[in-house]
Image (spheres, helix red, strand yellow):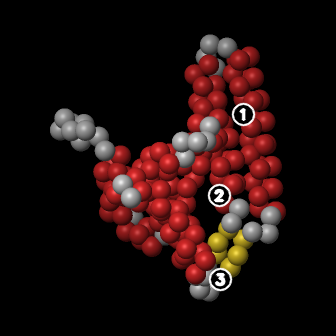
Amino acid sequence: QIMLGREVRPINTLFIAGAVIIFLFPWEIYSPGFHLSFGATAAIILFYRGYSSVLTGLHPFLRNSFSLTLAAQTVTAPLIFYHLNQVNLASLPANVAAVPLVAAIMGISLASLFIYPLSLFIASVAGEITNLLFQLLVYVTQFFSSLSLNFYSESLPPLLIAAFIMTLVPLINRWWGL
């Protein structure tokens, strides 16, 4: 797209990446990991702005985390149910807590790579901060995993279908002006 002087569209890039993976490794089309990775990424690209525009009453920090999590789970929740026959009600709050921690860990880690040649001390401090954030992330995931909010089912309960459809309401409102 760049070589042709066109605007780069993330969804096109995602589909090209998916096509390359399927061309090189055709069996990946059946992989739950492939479905979840590409589904979550596509949902974030397509739905993030819709959720963000509806959640304007939240602090930007929380709005971004909620919007990202809701967008991804719009696709991943049904896929997880399809592949694993389970629903985890703790996934929304767990991801809202984990997303900023992972972003901070990645950002500080990347910064420390660039700082290292200039100052070993500052890079070491950044590494310690990253380690503390990682330990906090592990604690958060263990906490949410300990909650008994994971349900297995052979059939999708009507209440769950209704809850899933309700997550789409902000998108319908934004796209069709209802």
In the image, which is nearer the foreground, mark 1 or mark 3?
3
In the image, which is nearer the foreground, mark 2 or mark 1?
2
Q: Is residue 37 at all visible to an observer of this figure?
A: no
Mark 3 → mark 2, Cα distance in angstroms: 19 Å
**Labelled pair 3, 2 in contact (Cβ < 8 Å):** no
Q: Is residue 41 left or right of residue 127?
A: left
Residue at 70 percent across and 76 percent down: it is 151
Instruction: Identify the residue position indicated by label 2 in the image.
Output: 92
Mark 2 → mark 1, Cα distance in angstroms: 24 Å
Residue at 79 percent across and 56 percent down: it is 142
Report x, y in % for residue 4.
Answer: 17, 38
Seen from the viewer's position, the closer of residues 116 and 149 is 149
Instruction: Identify the residue position indicated by label 3 in the image.
Output: 153
Instruction: Identify the residue position indicated by label 1 in the image.
Output: 130
Q: Of callouts 2 and 1, which one flags the residue occurring earlier in the amino acid sequence?
A: 2
Report x, y in % for residue 145.
Answer: 77, 61
Q: Of callouts 3 and 2, which one flags the residue occurring earlier in the amino acid sequence?
A: 2
**Labelled pair 1, 3 in contact (Cβ < 8 Å):** no
Label 3: few (<14), some or many (≥20) within 10 Å? few
Quarter placement of the C terminus:
bottom left
Q: Amino acid at mark 3?
A: Ser
Residue 42 image-quadrant placement: bottom left
Q: Is residue 22 at all visible to an observer of this figure?
A: yes
- Callout 3: SS: loop
